[in-house]
Image (spheres, rainbow, N blue to C red):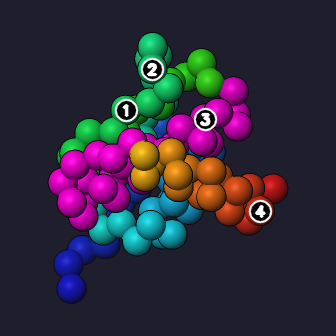
């Protein structure tokens, strides 16, 4: 058994959402979610770095994190991102998160 993977963020709520998605999606690699100035809503890189725009409203931020976490799972499992799957799963993840944390 390897060392426990870590989920980190520069934002407390982003960390909570990311850990929630991490567990549901059964990710295994390290993830870092960084809230920063961006033009797009978010990016996910194949090394586990996720960037989320700092201008998003709370509900949009949650949705963007859910979306990018699906991409993180895709990179782990198949090595490429699939937008259709990410859009299909983001709403379910967001609804489950809201049900558990609000």
Quarter-of-image position of residue 32: top left
Q: Position of residue 49 (x, y in %)?
A: 31, 41
Q: Residues within 10 Å of mark 1 (few under 14, many from 20)?
A: many
Compute the Cα span from label 2 to label 1. Answer: 8 Å
* Alpha carbon distance from label 3 to label 4: 16 Å
Name the residue that disc number 2 marks. 40
Residue 80 lies left or right of residue 58; in this view the side is: left
Q: Are marks 4 and 2 in contact (CB under 8 Å)?
A: no
Confirm or deny contact between disc 1 and disc 4 (CB under 8 A). no
Q: CA distance from mark 3 to mark 2?
A: 12 Å
Name the chief secondary structure element in magenta.
helix
Give the extent of the magenta segment: 57-83
Position of the C terminus by quadrant: bottom right
Mark 3 or mark 2: whose residue is earlier in sequence: 2
**Quadrant of the rendered image containing residue 44:** top left
Dot 4: within a 10 Å radius of its alpha carbon, few (fewer than 14), some, or many (20 or more) residues?
few
Labels 4 and 2: the sequence-earlier one = 2
Determine if residue 10 is in view.
yes
Disc marking residue 99: 4
**Residue 30 visible to an observer of this rendering:** no
Q: Nearer the viewer, mark 3 or mark 2?
A: 2
Provide the residue designation for mark 1: 43
Q: Secondary structure at mark 4?
A: helix
Residue 61's disc number = 3
Which badge, 1 or 4, is on the more N-terminal residue? Answer: 1
């Amino acid at each position: 058994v390897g060392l426990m993977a870590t989920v980190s963020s520069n934002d407390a709520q982003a960390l909570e959402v990311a850990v929630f998605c991490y567990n549901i999606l059964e990710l295994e690699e390290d993830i870092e979610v960084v809230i920063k100035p961006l033009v797009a809503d978010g990016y996910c890189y194949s090394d586990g770095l996720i960037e989320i725009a700092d201008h998003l409203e709370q509900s949009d931020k949650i949705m963007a994190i859910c979306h990018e976490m699906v991409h993180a799972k895709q990179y782990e499992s198949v090595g490429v991102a699939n937008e259709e799957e990410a859009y299909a799963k983001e709403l379910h993840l967001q609804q489950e998160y809201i049900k558990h944390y609000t």
